[in-house]
Amino acid sequence: MSECISFNIENGRFMCIATTNETCDGVECTFHRTAKAQRASLGQAHARLRSLPEEAQVSIADTYYDGKMPWREDK
């Protein structure tokens, strides 16, 4: 079984939710990402968002996050 966060069981079959593949190509897949890698990537994205000016953060929050700023909730 793959550690990839995109590998899922759907209707009793293993399925990649990032691609249309029914099999996992493992680390060879360009979409392969472990939960640990995903948390690290999200942490980096949130750090970048926190570094932006307040006006930019508000605009991004309004456009993509329904006015919420989850990057400010990171520890």
Image: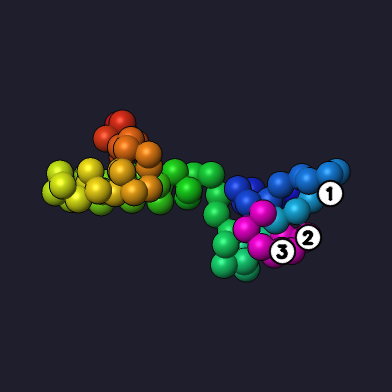
Q: Is residue 71 above or below residue 44?
A: above
Q: Tell whether position 3 is magenta.
A: no
Residue type pointed to by label 1: Arg
Cβ–Cβ below 8 Å for labels 1 and 2? yes
- Report which residue position mark 1 lands on: 13
**Viewer-proximal residue among 73 and 55:** 55
Q: Are marks 3 and 1 in contact (CB under 8 Å)?
A: no
**How far separated are the C-alphas under marks 3 and 2?**
7 Å
Residue 43 % position (x, y): 35, 44
Point out which mark residue 43 bears.
none
Question: 29 and 20: which one is in front?
Answer: 20
Residue shown at the point (62%, 68%) measured from the top left: 28
Which numbered circle lies on residue 22?
2
Q: Name the magenta segment's main secondary structure.
A: loop
Mark 3 against mark 1, which lies toward the viewer?
Answer: 3
Q: Going 32% across and 37% down the picture, which residue do you hit? A: 67
Q: Where is mark 3, residue-wise?
A: 20
The local secondary structure at tag 1 comes to strand
State the extent of the magenta-drawn residues as a range: 17-25
Give the distance between the C-alpha atoms of the residues marked 1 and 2, in whole angstroms: 8 Å
Q: Picture coordinates of residue 22 (x, y %)?
A: 78, 60
Of labels 3 and 1, earlier in sequence is: 1
Give neighbour class at mark 3: few <14, some 14-19, many 20+ (Cα, 10 Å).
few
Task: State if disc 2 and disc 3 touch (CB < 8 Å).
Answer: no
Screen quadrant of the C terminus? top left
Q: Considering depth in this image, is 10 or 23 the residue closer to the camera? A: 10
Mark 2: amino acid = Glu
Front: mark 3 or 2: 3
Q: Residue at 37% x, 39% y: name it.
A: 66
